[in-house]
Each structure stands twice: as structure tokens, then as C-alpha cells.
Image (tube, rainbow, N blue to C red):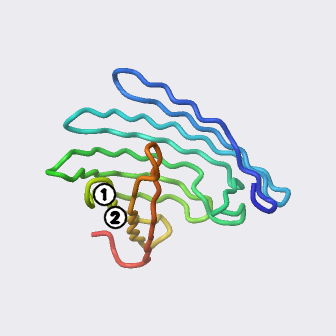
Amino acid sequence: ITGSLLNAGPTLAFASPTGELDLLGFASASNGVSGSAGEAIYNWVRPGFSFDIGLQLQSASYATIFQPPSYDCYLSNLTAAFGVPIGSRYISLSATHAYDRDLGEENGFGASTTFPIGQRMTLDVTYQRTQLERGGNRTDIFTSVNFPIGAYAYGGVTADASTAGGSMT
């Protein structure tokens, strides 16, 4: 709850020997406008690789603390990723297909890795390149330094950079 925004919903997780399925649902209300969102994520992790696939759906007026109902938002987002350990790092490649309310269809690919910093901290770096249906491209770089807080919790400091333009060749 923030100002005139309410966003809440349940999360269910099902674990099995073949992976984990997470189901999330949310409802929002902001300045008299209501919205909803749902997400299904499947994670399959083995010692030498991991595979993730996720589908996110949301209404055109769904709102969060970072996304008022008037902002463009995805109506659907399908992402698949495959990761492998390489030395002390973990490398993951991903592909995304989304449909945004205002921008229309977008397709993207990305790569991410984690660098250990000392014994308990990590630096996560993600690169994402997106081709927009209505012209143009977007490049995003996300970074995060993660650190322990006590015995069972972690915190993080993040920084994001985004640029539009160029070609996706």
C-alpha cells in the first residue's frame, strides 16, 4: 500500500524432483483504476545447467509502485532461459517475446552472469537487447551487488541503464 495504490496477491510454489513451479497472482487499485496480473514460472536446475520458462499476463491498467496505470505495460511476456556454470561464474542466455499495450510486439535476447566478490557477495550483470515492432531497439544493462544480511536474508544495491535506437543486426 502506497498513497492511493494497493497491490497484493498470493504466491504458490510446487517443488518436485524435476523442478519447481511458481504461480503468482496480483490485483491492484490505483486512483480508482483496478488491474490484475498473473505469472507462471517453471525452473529446472541440475548441477551442470538450468532451464527456466515463464509466462506473465497483466491487464492494461495493472499498477505497481514503479508502474502507474497510465504507463505502458506488457500484456503478455514469455521468457525462456538456459544457464551453465563456467568456472566460478554462471552464464545464462535468454529469449523474450512480449506484447506491450502501447508499443506492441517486442522480441529480445539477453545474457547474464554472476561474479563472486569475496566469500559472500556477488555482482550480477544482465545485458538485454530488444527489437520493437513499431520501430527502434532498446538495450538495457542491469547490475546488482548482493550481500548477506544476517544468517538467512540477502540485500542488494541495483543500477540500471537503458538506451534506445540503433539496429539489431
Q: Position of residue 4 (x, y in %)?
A: 81, 60
Q: Position of residue 132 (x, y in %)?
A: 46, 66
Q: Is residue 102 left or right of residue 5?
A: left
The residue that appears at 59% across and 51% down in the rendered structure is 75
Which residue is label 1 attached to? 112
Would you place residue 52 above or below residue 136 in this image?
above
Q: Amino acid at mark 1?
A: Ser
Q: Are marks 2 and 1 in contact (CB under 8 Å)?
A: yes
Alpha carbons under labels 2 and 1: distance apart: 6 Å
Q: Is residue 42 left or right of residue 86?
A: right
- Where disc 1 sits, the SS reads strand
The residue that appears at 78% across and 52% down in the rendered structure is 29
Disc 2 residue crowd, few under 14, some 14–19, many 20+, Cα 10 Å: some
The residue that appears at 40% across and 40% down in the rendered structure is 53
Q: Name the quarter where the C terminus is drawn.
A: bottom left
Disc 1 residue crowd, few under 14, some 14–19, many 20+, Cα 10 Å: some
Q: Amino acid at mark 2?
A: Tyr
Q: Quadrant of residue 71?
A: bottom right
Q: Position of residue 49 (x, y in %)?
A: 23, 39
Q: Quadrant of residue 50?
A: top left
Which residue is label 2 attached to? 127
Which mark sits nearer the N-terminus, 2 or 1?
Answer: 1
Q: Is residue 85 left or right of residue 74?
A: left
Q: Name the quarter where the N terminus is drawn.
A: bottom right
Residue at the limit of the structure toward the right, as seen here: 32
Residue at the limit of the structure toward the top, as seen here: 17
Q: Position of residue 36 (x, y in %)?
A: 69, 45
Residue at the limit of the structure toward the left, as seen here: 87
Would you place residue 136 above or below residue 96 in this image?
below
